[in-house]
Amino acid sequence: MQVEGFSNTTSSDHSTVIRACRRLESELWETCIGAYAQGLMEQGEPGKEEVVGFAFCNAKEFTKEERGDCLGLVEDFSQTYFRKNDTN
């Protein structure tokens, strides 16, 4: 499934993605935002991947509730994926 708007994003303006995720059914919003944040983190500087994830979650376009959800997703992903790989 392709969500309109994802191909037009820049590294610093995530508003298009946030709006595109909001157009999805409510139960898909978290998956959409989480997958986008995860992709940003995977492209982040090794050892500091969460920096870009947290920056994304602090975008002004998020509501307070959305921001909290996003930050939780980034924290979970950071701990379960990147920190686990640091021990290998």
Image (tube, grey):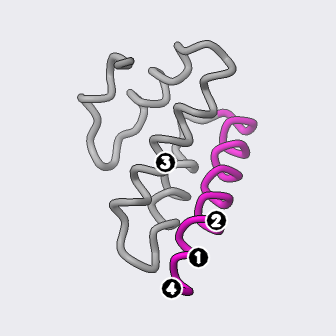
Res. 46 image quadrant: bottom left
Lower sequence index among marks 3 and 4? 3
Q: Nearer the viewer, residue 1 or 63?
A: 1
The crowd level at tag 3 (other Cα within 10 Å; few <14, some 14-19, many 20+) is: many
Left or right of 62? Residue 55 is left
> Which residues are the magenta region?
63-88
Name the amino acid type tagged 3.
Ala
Q: Give the percent coordinates (x, y) of residue 85.
A: 52, 76
Answer left or right for 10 relative to 32. Answer: left
User: CA–CA distance between discs 2 and 3?
Assistant: 14 Å
Q: Residue at x 71, y 52 (%)?
A: 72
- Secondary structure at badge 1 equals helix
Residue 23 spot, x, y in % from top left? 52, 13
Residue 48 percent coordinates (x, y): 46, 75
- Report the side of 35 relative to 72 (left or right): left
Q: Which mark is residue 80?
A: 2
Which numbered marker is on residue 83?
Answer: 1
Tell me if label 3 and label 4 are in contact, CB under 8 Å. Answer: no
* Contact flag, marks 4 and 1 (Cβ < 8 Å): no
Q: Quadrant of residue 45?
A: bottom left
Callout count? 4
